[in-house]
Structures are given as C-alpha cells and as structure tokens.
C-alpha cells in the first residue's frame, strides 16, 4: 500500500505529495536559512505521517514538544538524564514503538552532542527483531554533524558525528529513515549530507550554500540565484519520494504550533518611566527570594521514595576467607588505582565507560582479579573521588544523610552536590563555576550555574550572594553552609584538593 503525505501545493495549484514508503528507503535533507519555514516544513511532515510510522525527533530548541499533546509523542528532557539513560531510552522506544521527542533545550553544545549521540545509539543498536520503520528527524543537523571542529571536545564531536553517520549511511537496513534539517549546507559534514536522496531546499542567500543546493538538485550554477527569491514556506523539491525534476512547492498549514512563537513588534509604552535609573539598576534580589516564590517540593517524600527504590547492597562475596588487614590492603590498592586513572589531565571530561575500562585494565595489572569493583560500584567510587571524599568521610554515619539526599539527583550530578556538601560541612568557600563544571565533566560555566539552579529547585540547597558578589550555599535541613566564595575562581580550596588526592 502506498501512503502519500500531503506536504502542500505546487506553484501551479496541484497537490504536492510525498511517498512515505519511498522516503523510508531514501532519506531526506532539508535546507533553509533562519525564517525560511524549515521547522514548519518538518512539523507538517511529522503531523501528516504520525498515524503511519513511528517517529523520533532530535530537538535542540524544544520546538517540537507540542506534538505530545496532539499526537501522543513522549517528550524526553535530556537535561534530566544521563547518557546511559538516554541510550536505554532509545532502545526501549524502538522495542515498544513509541514516538519520542528528545528535548535538548537548556544544554550546552557539547552535552547536546553527547546526549543526542547516546539516544541515536540506542535507536541504532536494538536487535534485528525490532527493526521497525521509523522516521528520525534531526533539526539543526549542523550542530550534530559539523563540517569542521568547533569549540567542543574532539571526543564529543566524534561521538555525535559517528551517530549521525550511522543514521544516514547504515540506518536504512535497520528501518531508520534519517531526515536532517540545516540552516547552512556549508556547515554540515558532506558525508552525512551526501547520503540523502530527497531534497527540500528553501531560501538562502550565501553563494556557497546556493551553489551546493544547486549541485544537489542538478541545477546549473546560473540557476542558483533562484534560491534567493523563494518566499517563507516555499521550497524546491527533488527526489524519488517527491519529484523526478526540481519542483517548487508551498508547504501547507499545521495543526500544532511551536512552543515559542516568532516575536512580534509591539508599540513602546506611552508613559515614560519616572526614574528609569533607579528601577533598572536596583540591587538584584537574593537568590533565596526566588526560591521562596515557588512552592517547595516535598523533600521528605522524595527522600523516602529514593530510599525505597534504592537496591540493597549485598556484602562482598569472597571465595576464600581473608583477614581485615588483607581487605584493607586490597581496598587501598583499588583506591590507589583509581587515583592513577583520575590523574590524567583529561580524566574529568572522559566518559565513565572509558574510565572504567582503563580502571579494570590497571586493576588486572595490579593482580587484583576478583576484587575489581563492578561498574555500579565504580560509579559510586568515582562520585566520591570527584567530590574530594576519602573513604573515612564517605563511610561516616553523619555523611549518610548527604548520600541519601544526593540520590534524588541524576547520577552525573551527585558528585557536584557532594563536593558542595563537603565544602559546607567543613566551612570552606563555595567552589567556583569552573570547579563545579569540572566535577560534572564539562567545560561550560553556564552549565555549572544551571546545576546549582536545578539543585535549588529540588529543594536541596539555597544559593545566596553576599554584598561583595561572593556566593555561598546552604544545605536544606542540615543547616551546613559554605563560606562565601568567588564564583569566578578557577580553583578549589586547598583542603579540598588535598582531600581529593588522598581519596
């Protein structure tokens, strides 16, 4: 059965249809400058095909989350999940044939790339029995498959580019039909763009982008000027699922709209502000005031739920009896091996899986054998080490309350919370943004600030500034508070560094 997706009308007034089965086999590339109607085109395509095929949308700006209310898509907030969690979510989405929107809004470029790569990897790696047809839409694809290296790490770029290449080059045999959209063809990796057989080219003005668009559509270079004349919502179409010859079409209306609409011009207020200087340059309110304006979450209930959901940790099973001295010596060797792994300059920014592989190899070289911790235990050790906690502190009875509170947060945030809790317990200055970002495994200072905001929203901490602009953090209920610290400081307190070295 042939399924025709109505995309709109041709300039002659005839219906412009897209063959969905042909699209699943041949992939699609959409190009258009900002304001050309590219996102509107994707929304029209998704709405028209939603009843017929499963969909996954990689959404860097949160434009497509409104599909959930009308078409039942599951919205996944990438900021709330680890890379491993998103990989598993991708696998389960295919297993249960659930259409999803991966909302990457709020993440910096590097974390957007990492989490999108993890989710795409989950879609790609399912067993053959679950290779159901699926449209995978990637908006702003130049962010995830850049033509040249940018400000992100090489590891993040390789992960993201590899996932995009798998989608476009190898995805067809697994039922994945890639639909990639970009503002700039020149910024999109050529090996990713070259795998598409269908094209919808919108308005563009730069010569290099017009030349590439003309080449892809088989048009002469002198005809490339036509792309400047396209109106908003007007595209040139070509491909086996669209038309055998370049065809100009106008995209039809949609049932849903983006969450953030295009800003409209509004008249300036008639009445002039009497004292603009006093209003605009007034001292900013304390952070605590912002926290008081929103309802506090039921922290006790969250803690109880987290404690009830936490698996019981069984005691270590050993094949032969060992003395307490031998266990202590073995633990010291494991800790020493972990310190050696974390001593690498880039250890704070490497994936946990990569660190664990190196850790296991070093443990085997040390002859530890069966004493090597599993991945779950390694995550716990890594969290404590990055927070500057020694074994004596981590096992202290008073610290267990902190560990319980940290369990509310995603795994990759717990080390940051514990680092701040340690500083508060000892009365040290609040760590700066750079130190917080490093403990999280990121280079982004804005990300560090968002982490503190998220923890405050969860009711775990209260962030305040003193008169000198220095930040201090108070832990809710425990009443521990850090000393004021400069958020721009790029180091940890000496005590924290020394503690981390002995962890």
Image: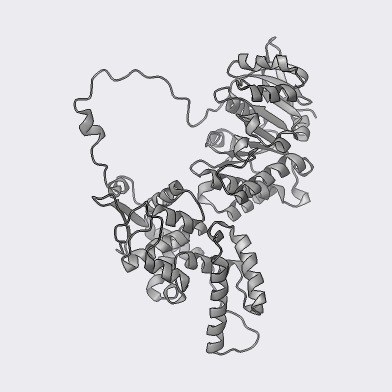
Q: Return the x and y of residue 430 as percentages of the image width and height.
A: 34, 59
Q: Image check: 421 left or right of 313?
A: left
Q: Residue at x 42, y 63 (%)?
A: 418
Q: How many marks?
A: 0
Q: Nearer the viewer, residue 176 or 436?
A: 436
- Observer able to see residue 96: no
The answer to which image quadrant residue 462 occupies is bottom left
The answer to which image quadrant residue 207 occupies is top right
The answer to which image quadrant residue 313 occupies is bottom right
The correct choice, above or below, for 419 with respect to 326 in the image is: above
Residue that extends furthest to the left in the rendered view of this protein: 274
Q: Return the x and y of residue 172 as percentages of the image width and height.
A: 77, 40
Q: Nearer the viewer, residue 305 or 198?
A: 198
Q: Return the x and y of residue 363 as percentages of the image width and height.
A: 63, 74
Q: Residue at x 59, y 15 (%)?
A: 231
Q: Nearer the viewer, residue 315 or 368?
A: 368
Q: Residue at x 56, y 58 (%)?
A: 346
Image quarter of the N terminus: top right
The correct choice, above or below, for 337 with respect to 482 in the image is: below
Q: Return the x and y of residue 67 as percentages of the image width and height.
A: 56, 34
- Observer able to see residue 148: yes
Q: Image check: 267 left or right of 41?
A: left
The correct choice, above or below, for 302 with respect to 55 in the image is: below
How was the colour assigned to the protein in this rendering? Answer: one colour
């Amino acid at each position: 059965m042939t399924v025709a997706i109505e995309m709109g009308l041709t300039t002659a007034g005839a219906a412009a249809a897209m063959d969905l089965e042909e699209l699943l086999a041949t992939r699609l590339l959409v190009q258009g400058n900002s304001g050309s109607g590219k996102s509107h085109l994707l929304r029209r395509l998704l709405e028209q095909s939603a009843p017929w095929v499963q969909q996954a949308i990689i959404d860097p700006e949160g434009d497509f989350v409104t599909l959930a209310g009308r078409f039942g898509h599951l919205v996944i907030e990438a900021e709330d999940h680890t890379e491993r969690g998103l990989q598993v979510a991708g696998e389960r989405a295919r297993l249960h044939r659930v259409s999803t929107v991966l909302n990457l809004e709020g993440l910096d470029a590097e974390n957007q790339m990492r989490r999108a790569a993890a989710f795409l990897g989950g879609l790609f790696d399912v067993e053959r029995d679950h290779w159901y047809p699926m449209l995978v839409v990637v908006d702003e694809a130049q962010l995830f498959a850049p033509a040249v290296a940018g400000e992100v790490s090489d590891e993040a770029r390789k992960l993201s580019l590899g996932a995009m290449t798998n989608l476009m080059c190898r995805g067809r045999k697994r039922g994945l039909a890639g639909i990639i959209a970009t503002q700039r063809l020149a910024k999109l990796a050529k090996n990713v763009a070259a795998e598409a057989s269908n094209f919808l080219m919108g308005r563009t003005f730069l010569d290099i982008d017009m030349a590439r668009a003309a080449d892809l559509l088989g048009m002469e270079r002198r005809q490339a000027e036509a792309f400047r004349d396209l109106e908003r919502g007007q595209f040139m179409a070509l491909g086996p699922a669209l038309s055998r010859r370049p065809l100009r079409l106008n995209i039809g209306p949609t049932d849903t709209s983006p969450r953030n609409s295009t800003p409209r011009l509004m008249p300036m207020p008639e009445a002039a502000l009497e004292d603009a200087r006093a209003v605009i340059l007034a001292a900013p309110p304390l952070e605590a005031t912002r926290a008081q304006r929103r309802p506090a979450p039921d922290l006790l209930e969250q803690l109880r739920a987290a404690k009830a959901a936490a698996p019981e940790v069984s005691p270590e099973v050993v094949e032969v009896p060992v003395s307490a001295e031998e266990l202590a010596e073995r633990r010291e060797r494991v800790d020493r091996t972990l310190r050696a792994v974390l001593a690498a300059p880039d250890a704070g920014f490497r994936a946990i899986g990569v660190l664990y592989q190196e850790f296991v190899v070093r443990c085997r070289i040390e002859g530890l054998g069966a004493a090597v911790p599993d991945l779950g235990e390694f995550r716990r050790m890594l969290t404590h080490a990055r927070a500057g906690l020694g074994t004596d502190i981590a096992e202290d009875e008073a610290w267990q309350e902190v560990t319980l509170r940290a369990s509310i947060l995603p795994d990759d945030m717990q080390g940051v919370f514990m680092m701040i809790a340690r500083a508060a317990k000892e009365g040290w200055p609040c760590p700066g943004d750079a130190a917080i970002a490093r403990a999280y495994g990121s280079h982004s200072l804005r990300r560090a600030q968002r982490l503190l905001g998220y923890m405050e929203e969860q009711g775990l901490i209260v962030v305040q500034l003193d008169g000198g602009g220095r930040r201090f953090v108070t832990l809710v209920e425990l009443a521990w508070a850090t000393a004021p610290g400069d958020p721009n400081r790029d180091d940890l307190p000496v005590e924290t560094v020394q503690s981390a070295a002995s962890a």
